[in-house]
Image (cartoon, rainbow, N blue to C red):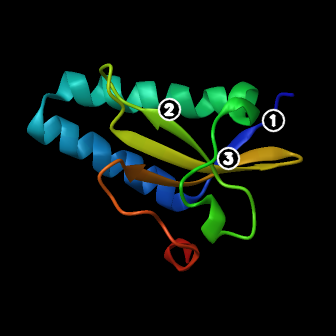
Amino acid sequence: MTRPVHQHFRVEAALEAGFCWWAKNRSPQQAARWYCGFIDALQSLSEIAERLPLASENDLFPFEVRQLTFGLGAKPTQRALFVIRPDMVYVIAIRHLSQQAIRPEGLD
């Protein structure tokens, strides 16, 4: 089933911060590749959301939380946490794999 993908405002802020990090620590070209690639991966959730695994945080929430992993190379570096609703896929957070699990109070 195809659903539109929407995202919390904190997701765009995390993507912008990631872009800035890549531009400063790698290169502007890699930053653009990372950003555009992640945006494309997030948009793919409209078709593949149900096939992706539950996030490690799932048991902490009163609703089902799934994850999409993303990275430029063979190893993913980021996770997009999302919720599947009847009318949309809602991306609630972007996390680096090294970050601790997000808790419900962290979504305020």
Q: Residue furthest left?
A: 25
The amino acid marked with disc number 3 is: His
Image position of 92 (left or right of 100): right
Residue 75 on image: x %, y %: 32, 27
Quarter of the N terminus within the rendering: top right
The residue closer to the viewer here, 81 or 14, is: 81
Residue at the image position 20 percent from the left and 37 percent from the top: 22
The residue type indicated by label 1 comes to Arg
State the SS at label 2: helix
Q: Quarter of the image for the C terminus: give it.
A: bottom right
Q: Residue at x 66, y 69 (%)?
A: 61
The kind of residue tagged 2 is Ile
Q: Which residue is mark 3?
A: 6
Q: Of marks 1 and 2, which one's residue comes earlier in the chain? A: 1
Position above or below: 101 against 81 = below
Expressed as whole percent of the image width and height from the top left, the position of residue 88 reads: 80, 45
Residue on which the image places disc 1: 3
* Res 39 label: 2
Q: How far apart in space, not on screen, are marks 3 and 1 (Cα)?
A: 9 Å
Q: Residues within 10 Å of mark 3 (few under 14, many from 20)?
A: some
The Cα–Cα distance between marks 3 and 2, rounded to whole angstroms, is 11 Å
Q: In the visual, does 36 lie left or right of 74?
A: right
For mark 3, give the secondary structure.
strand
Task: Report the residue at 39% width, 46% height from top.
Answer: 15
Helix, strand or loop at disc 1?
loop
Graded by Cα atoms within 10 Å as few (under 14), some (14 to 19) or many (20 or more), the crowding at tag 2 reads few
Number of numbered discs = 3
* Alpha carbon separation for disc pair 1 and 2: 16 Å
In the displayed structure, does residue 3 sit left or right of residue 9? Answer: right
**Vertical order, 63 against 36 (above or below):** below
